[in-house]
Amino acid sequence: MSTTKLTQAAAVNAGEEAEGWLAHWPLLSAIAILFGMLALEYGYDYIPAFPYNFIIYCVAYLLSGYNVLYMAWRKAVRLDFFNEFFLMSVATIGAFAIGSYSEGVAVMAFYSIGEWFQDSAVNRAKRSIKALLDVRPEEVTVIRGGKSETVHPKEVQVGEVIRVKPGEKVALDGELASDKASFNTTALTGESKPDTKGKGEKIYAGMINLNMVAEVTVTALFQDSKLSRILEMVQDATSRKSQTQLFISRFAKVYTPIVFALALAVCFLPYLFVQDYIFKVWFYRALVFLVISCPCALVVSIPLGYFGGIGLASRKGILFKGSNFLDVMTEVDVVVMDKTGTLTEGIFKVQEVAVQGLTEGELLRAAAALESQSTHPIGMAIVEHAGKETFQDASISNVEEISGHGLKGTIDGKEVLAGNTKLMRKFNIDYPQAVDAIVYTIVVVAIDNKYGGHITIADQIKEDAQSAISGLHKLGIQTVMLSGDKKAVVEQVAKELGIDNAYGDLLPEGKVERVQQLKDQGKRIAFVGDGVNDAPVVALADAGIAMGGLGSDATIETADIVIQNDQPSKIVTAIRAGKLTKQIVWQNIILAMSVKIIVLALGAGGIANLWEAVIADVGVALLAILNAVRIQKSHI
């Protein structure tokens, strides 16, 4: 984000904070009146005579609780009596009815303070999630008729060219029209490492141009960009509730009427058993019971905890499409992974060049010159490794593709063969038997009917793949790899990484079958993939994870969790985010219920008064909120 926008954002936040305090002037006034009256009573032993004290406390009560009373009235009109607003209204009006004016105002004032803090914490969590990713520029420079115009990104059409200055964010998805440019991809991947792009390569909205003016040909409308879709995912995530949230919502609907019934029992049942029954005493105890039973600490702190979990994961480049998937990740006992693009780079690279009777340069010149006439990924890997300058002056002729075998051609007047061992056998060329034992893809090269060497090509394992597997094992999670690659290659990669089980030569339906077998064994499965062929398995798994927020559209749409960069170690981070969130949510549940049960018992026994009840209730709510907010500040 530019310095200007950071300043604007800070000003907006400061303005919102100031407006927040001003909006609560009635509550602040009520607190000032309450403390003033308490100072008179306990500091100067002076209590204004009735009705003056009643009027003063009524003013403070209405200032502090008009929102609560209004919500209670609206719900009561709809015959909804079992909610925290009606509960607080009954408790405080009851306190006034027995002459406990200061306690009635205190209950309402401190409850309103608790609501203020709760609303503030929830809104801040939502804002932090939105601000974390909402980095779409509001204007873009587009080239029209040879002139540059500044317009809103929504006005730019597919095929138009936009200009991005150093330090600016790319506003729309497209292809780089300039020769090259470097970009910061933090908004999309969570990683700030510069990514240098060449002409024709994909550029995505949210990337920041680092060093030179770049021109980008637009390939998608503003609303269809990857970043726009990522933002929609995060916004939708907050509306998808976890099982814990759903349980607490259902619990509150049952819990509140039970509390009302118990409060009535506390008030009236003692009449049948206590000889010196005094209605005012037991009515007061019932009011204490009602105040402490308010479930607001649970109802607010739990969603706040899940908001925090989603925000924490987002900062790490992991998008949960719902808080329910945070819970699912804590229960996973098997992580099934695709190989290509998930654990490996998905790009063929030359790993080794072996020569016999030639220099390495001579072999690469001949092989690269011949393979330059092919568009096969393996051939392109050899050309890239050798460099075009090594064969740019070579004489190339009579190039012929032999289907399923390789290429044959004349390079600098010499007949060159480049392909698999079947090609060597076809032309009766002897080669070392050890070549047949090589697991990875090889290109054997012969010059003038004589074996000259071979080039080993493999899909490179990602840097953090090893740490991802070891991290999963430390968490007690089994690892399985499924791939369409040949079995020998899959088993070799699995051996290098320490994966528990690996299966190769699989078609998409074969992957589905393997995952279904694991599910039939009662396993909770997370599947990680990046290709279109992975979409069916992603949908079948308990938690489907798309590797690479810039990967296959079908897989991203189907997935429950999207890892925005290509780091498999983020799988471990996603599980830790889920575990931390669940841990803190349950800490809040246990804290709130434990304190409430203790103070409910003390209130019913006449030991706790209304002051203690409200302090316990608001105190627990604030502790739960602070504990939930801690998730957003955590390091995982």
Image (cartoon, rainbow, N blue to C red):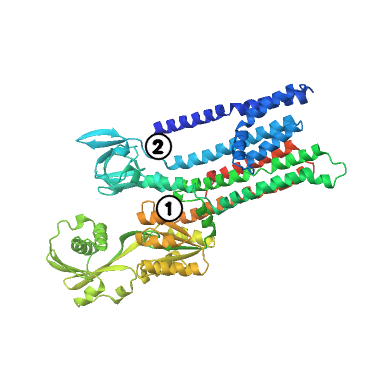
The spot of residue 219 in percent (x, y) is 28, 46
Residue 555 occupies quadrant: bottom left
> Which residue appears at 37% of the width and 40% of the height?
136
What amino acid does circle 1 point to? Val
The spot of residue 424 in percent (x, y) is 22, 74
The spot of residue 8 in percent (x, y) is 43, 30
What amino acid does circle 2 point to? Met
Q: Which residue is mark 1?
A: 562
- Count residues near mark 1 (Cα–Cα under 10 Å), then give few for <14, some for 14-19, many for 20+: many
- Answer above or below: position of 415 versus 283: below
Which is nearer the eye, 413 or 480? Answer: 480
The residue tagged with tag 1: helix, strand or loop?
Answer: strand
Residue 297 occupies quadrant: top right
Mark 1, mark 2: which one is toward the viewer? 1
Residue 605 occupies quadrant: top right
Q: Which residue is mark 2?
A: 1
Q: Earlier in the sequence, mark 1 or mark 2?
A: 2
- Answer above or below: position of 83 versus 65: below
